[in-house]
Amino acid sequence: MPQNLIFAPMGALVFLTFTVLVLIPLRQFRAGAAGQVQTDDLKFAGWAAVPGEVAIPNRNLMNLLELPMLFYVAGLMYYVTGKVDSMVLGIAWTYVALRAIHTLIHITYNNVFHRLTVFTLSNFVLGAFWVGFFVR
């Protein structure tokens, strides 16, 4: 199996991350134009005066830059050691799909139970991705 196939799910997760990154200023500018926030409201990380719809993409971006780093590292480890196979790709794509669902829930209707369920599942899949590497 071509080892570089592992870069497809990795690239998809990067694309998701950049999509959320673009969403942040769009929501901030829209809220500013509507008078919902002032420039000073966005100065500090607390964002107490910022509406949720403006702050959530920023929090989601942080989520996409935390545990997914372990996904990128493991993906590179699979590639370098030549251990990419169809099972590895299936796990990788499952992880990316769960992260995408988590993001969609977070930036749309933001039901905490739904979001936490998908987040937890994605972490189990990420754990399986790592265990699979060491078992092989």
Image (cartoon, rainbow, N blue to C red):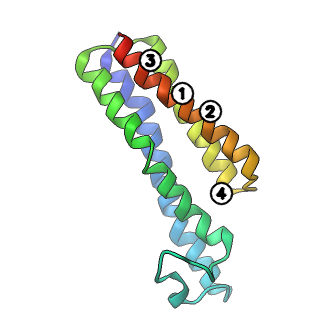
Question: Callout 4: helix, strand or loop?
Answer: helix
**Residue ID for mark 4:** 107
Would you place residue 84 above or below residue 16 in this image? Answer: above
Q: Nearer the viewer, residue 2 or 41?
A: 41
Seen at 51% across and 71% down, the residue is: 25
Q: Earlier in the sequence, mark 2 or mark 3?
A: 3
Distance, label 3 to label 1, CA atoms, is 11 Å
User: How packed is label 4: few (under 14 Cα within 10 Å), some, or many (20 or more)?
Assistant: many
Left or right: 126 with respect to 1? right
Circles 4, 1 touching at the beta carbon (< 8 Å): no
Seen at 35% across and 28% down, the residue is: 75
The amino acid beneath tag 1 is Val
Give x and y (percent) for residue 128.
Answer: 49, 22
**Residue ID for mark 3:** 88
Q: Earlier in the sequence, mark 4 or mark 3?
A: 3
Q: Which dot, 4 or 1, sits closer to the camera? A: 1
Q: Quadrant of the N terminus?
A: top left
Distance, label 4 to label 3, CA atoms, is 29 Å
Would you place residue 125 above or below residue 63 in this image? Answer: above
Q: Which mark is residue 121?
A: 2
Distance, label 4 to label 1, CA atoms, is 22 Å
Circles 2, 3 touching at the beta carbon (< 8 Å): no
Q: Which mark is residue 125?
A: 1
